[in-house]
Image: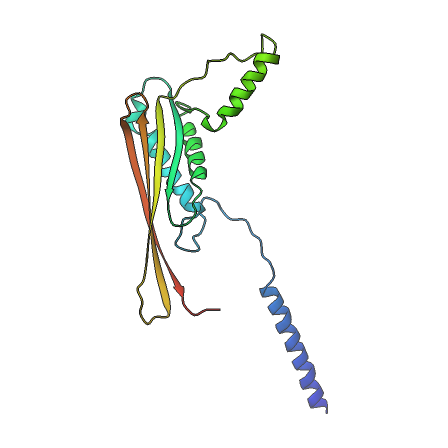
């Protein structure tokens, strides 16, 4: 009887440990990550790609002879990066980051018209014209016009392994970012650059 009781107690203890271990496995875990070195969990575009592409393009623009040879400040307007991808990509986040880095790297030699807030600007100017005192009223018709327009396109190409007997599938995704600076007076593309990368991910067809 003692042997049986001991076996039962041992079994209960082992079962309890397994339950506790299992609970720990399914417990939520939260940890901060270094945003300058974020991992890729699949082959598609992610936060680290946003940072890398934006940084490379901004550095290429800010250090180019095109910018260095411009007299005085360079006023631009951004009309966005066109997403030509099969999955959703927030290209607005890319242009926001491009703008910030360009202003910093050029020590504000590159300046931008706030095209996304034009309605708010006009509304505030109208309010001030009717209600503000003369010494604080913003003058109408003093906004600066952009000389150059920054646009771009992000393309995506996907390729997967063909149909065959296999235990996993491999996906290859290629991305290319093209950014152009166009002279608004002449319509000529004054400067252009491209950045690209590809990533492959292998996924098991049978898994837990």
User: Where's residue 85, x and y in %?
Assistant: 37, 47
| Quadrant of image for the N terminus | bottom right
Which corner quadrant of the image does residue 204 belong to?
Answer: bottom left
User: Where's residue 31, x and y in %?
Assistant: 56, 52
Vertical relation: 89 (above or below) 63: below
Residue furthest bottom as drawn = 1
Residue drawn at x 33%, y 31% is: 61
Residue drawn at x 38%, y 37% is: 81
Vertical relation: 114 (above or below) 197: above
Residue drawn at x 62%, y 66% is: 23
Q: In this view, does 30 lie to the left or right of 86?
A: right
Vertical relation: 29 (above or below) 108: below
Tell which of 185 and 98 is nearer to you: 185
Q: Is residue 86 left or right of residue 9?
A: left
Color scheme of the displayed model: rainbow
Q: Is residue 18 left or right of residue 166?
A: right
Give the total of numbered labels: 0
Vertical relation: 195 (above or below) 25: above
User: Where's residue 183, x and y in %?
Assistant: 31, 24
User: Where's residue 118, x and y in %?
Assistant: 49, 24
Tell which of 166 and 128 is nearer to you: 128
């Amino acid at each position: 009887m003692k042997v049986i009781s001991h076996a039962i107690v041992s079994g209960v203890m082992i079962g309890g440990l397994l339950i506790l271990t299992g609970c720990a496995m399914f417990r939520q875990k939260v940890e901060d990550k270094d945003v300058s070195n974020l991992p890729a969990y699949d082959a598609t575009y992610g936060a680290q790609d946003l940072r890398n592409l934006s940084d490379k393009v901004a550095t290429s623009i800010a250090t180019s002879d095109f910018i260095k040879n411009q007299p005085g400040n360079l006023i631009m307007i951004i009309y966005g990066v066109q997403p030509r991808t099969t999955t959703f990509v927030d290209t607005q986040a890319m242009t926001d980051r491009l703008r910030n880095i360009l202003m910093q790297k050029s020590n504000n030699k590159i300046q931008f018209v706030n095209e996304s807030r034009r309605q708010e600007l006009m509304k505030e100017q109208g309010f001030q014209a009717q209600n503000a005192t003369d010494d604080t009223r913003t003058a109408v018709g003093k906004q600066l016009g952009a000389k150059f327009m920054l646009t771009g396109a992000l393309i995506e190409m996907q390729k997967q392994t063909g149909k065959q007997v296999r235990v996993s599938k491999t996906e290859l995704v290629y991305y290319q970012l093209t950014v152009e600076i166009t002279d608004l007076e002449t319509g000529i593309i004054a400067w252009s650059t491209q950045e690209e990368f590809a990533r492959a991910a292998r996924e098991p067809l049978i898994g837990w």
